[in-house]
Amino acid sequence: MLKYIFSFFKNTVIIPKADRLYYFLIYILFVSLLSSCMGVKFLKTNEKILHSQSIKGAKGFKMEDIESLYENKPNKRLPLLPVAPYIYLYQDGLRKFDPEKYEAKKEKLRKKYERKIEKANDNSKKEKKLQAKLVRKIDKQDKNIKEGNLGMRIGEPLAVYDTTLERVTVEKLKSYFDSRGYFNAEVSYSTEPIGEKMVKVIYEVNRRKYYLIDSIYYGISDSKVKNLLISTNTSAHVQKGHVYNQENIVKERERITDLMLNNGYYDFNRQFLNFQVDTAYLGNNKVTIGILIKNPPKKEGYKVYKLDSVIFTTDADIKGVRSTRQQATYNTVSYQFYKKRYAKRLMDWRVFIYPDSIYSKANTLETQRQFSNLDIFKFINVNYDTTGGKFIANIFTSPLQKYQTSTEGGINVSQGLPGPFVNFNLKNRNTFKGLEVMELNGRVGFEGLGGASKSGNGYSSLEYGVNLTFTFPQFLFPFGEKFKSRIGRYNPQTKIISGLTYTDRPEYLRSNISSSMSYNWQNRQDRIYNLTIADVSYIISDITSESFRKTLEEYKAQGNNLINSFSNSFVSSTKFAVINNYNDYGNKKQKSSYLRYSLEVGGNLFKLLGEQYLEEGVEQFQFAKIRTDYRSTVPINSKESFAYRFHVGYALPYGENKTLPYEKFFFAGGSNSVRAWEPRRLGPGSYYPADTLGNYSNNFEQQGEILFESSIEYRHKIFGFVYGAIFVDAGNIWTVREDGSRPGAHFEFDRFYKEIAVGSGYGLRFDFNFLLMRFDVGMKIYDPSGPPGAKFIGDAGFKDPSYKNYERLVFNIGIGYPF
């Protein structure tokens, strides 16, 4: 079937322009192919296939919301192709489906396991195991009977057009527009034939005039509650003069409920809150909304609950201890414990409920959230007790294991090539009895990298190292106690990390002794700040490849100081970064996004403290570096979504050596970059990498100081755990200064847009819940390094045989989504 479609498109490209009869014949051929690929042969007499649905008059509304109301659902098709393969999977499974065979298999299984159970000889443990196994196998056969065989479950039945379902859809659409303020909207539908056996449905909405909220009144007998709502009505979701929208009613219900629960009304229930919507009283497309709050049963009003005491039990799940718990009070909170483990002063910074304060749901949840962030406790529960005429808050926690070890091994995929690794982790919680966490991490692994020279050498980087990390639940800085207490809700942390890393690559050996101190905090749940006060490294490098050394020396002779990046060096920097995660980035239900931007300044630390502390001949690097990474996913429906990314960066080396530490350069190409180029082999600019004979050669990684990358993906579910993606990537790197060793590498405003490489391709994703494996194949569409007439895929010279070793198709392996 598909070969006929591909043949059709191929032939239409090479056949010269014909007359009207030619185009008419092409149309007839296309319609016939379309019908055959959509499963028409499976139709019964007088049946038609629902090909597609559209709606008119719904501009400005979310199409995914409207499409979810359609009762008739067309069959899923392959992207950009009129092919519905799931029909054929289902029909093939249906042809083989035999319920009697599964019933017979069930009976056979019962007899088989009855014999095994008889032979168990009163071994109850073995008998229970056999019984459980039988139940699982019977359940599998019942699933086959109820849901069909594998082909039927993966595939889907033919989408037969049903007029009864259309009438249901019309009613649902009418209700939808009612809920958006168009109470007089009219909805109708019509059909258009596609060929003889398929139909397209078109819904048409005549919205008429919308209804405005003319007045809002309160039916609240408790005057204090009424005044509270009136005093906060500027933040209400329901406002006079706005178009009526049922979604705003739902939001206002949530707002009022939270408002009551955050102002001491502990016994308030959303069932006491009702909205009365009247469209007939005023007429003339106006709505009156009443906000009604009933008093609690058998009460004349609402009570404001004030805490009498707060009791914090730090080891709630410990049992079997004969001694009684000790008690201690700090800042009016009573702490109970069998063993004193934690500094009460630090605990107090994360508690936001106190005696004599009114009940607040927000402060309750904030207390739970802040203690959950510490990685110290198994759980954090807050219960309220109203018995005996007292209002008591009970906070219950229980410690996690003080010492925890873990070892993991696996395959790490970096820049498209896999490499095995082993990690070891030792964690010590509450190290100094101040809620600290100490972690010792060791790692040995082959990084999946192409060589800095010689492309395609897998497992070319052996790396091992160890890191020691201390995480403190506060800012280690001489701030006052009141200040530290006030910022407790911002989840302040100080991280001190020291480590040693050794890297063995074909071109060089590199040892890195590093240490850093950073502050992390959050002013809201979707935003994290990171301030790295100092990140220092002492790097010892040894170039082991003579050809690599020779190349670096040739670069230096032409003004490229990259060789300085491979000298023994001291690297220091200060960095500030902000990470925004909107709507839980990557969720499949609503639009979400991720934005990270950072500023890093390097080399000024020792300029400030004095260079006399450094050994002679040790390189220093002064640089400034900024980068921004924006990503977004937009679900179309439960099985399809769009995702896109923009990633830009700029680094300026301004020290005497005019270069960056090698790890601070930008690179492009690979499984998480522009996928039609090999890892780190794209760019810079229009530079054409050539060997001494002038032939194309990508033996060396290409580094730059300016980066631009963008990608877009259409992601779709194929079946089960298998997903697919059509993608387009664009980007490149450039240098900030002229580079005599790489002509065309320099960034210039009047030509950089001509040097943006473009690649496209298709990828498969295997989502195993705990792991997502990705296989992408990228094809070069536009290569700025090519000679004139050979840059674009449509150019005649793009397939020039002088491009020896030039790969137009690049295969990538990755773990997780590329962005």
Image (cartoon, grey):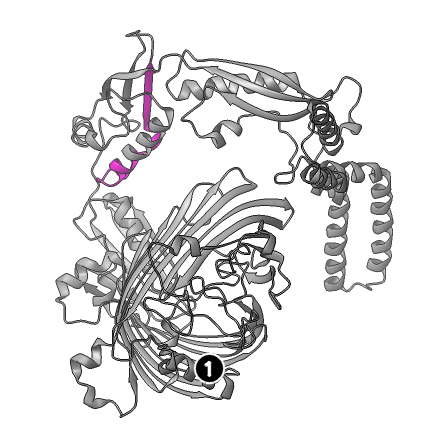
User: Does the image show residue 21?
Assistant: yes
At mark 1, the secondary structure is helix
In the rendered view, would you say 194 is above or below 685? above
* Residue drawn at (40%, 14%) of the image: 183
In the rendered view, would you say 489 is above or below 288? below
Residue type marked 1: Thr
User: Does the image show residue 766?
Assistant: no
In x, y percent, where is residue 241? Answer: 24, 20
In the rendered view, would you say 343 is above or below 589? below
Residue for badge 1: 551
Is residue 711 toward the left or the right of residue 199 in the image? left
Viewer-side residue, 793 vs 796:
796
Is residue 509 toward the left or the right of residue 276 in the image? right
Magenta run includes residue 265? yes
* Residue drawn at (52%, 60%) of the image: 786
Is residue 344 toward the left or the right of residue 695 in the image? left
In x, y percent, where is residue 683? Answer: 46, 64
Magenta run includes residue 506? no
Q: Quadrant of the N terminus?
A: top right
Which range is magenta? 257-278
Is residue 642 toward the left or the right of residue 574 in the image? right
Viewer-side residue, 700 vs 427:
700
In x, y percent, where is residue 418? Answer: 58, 70
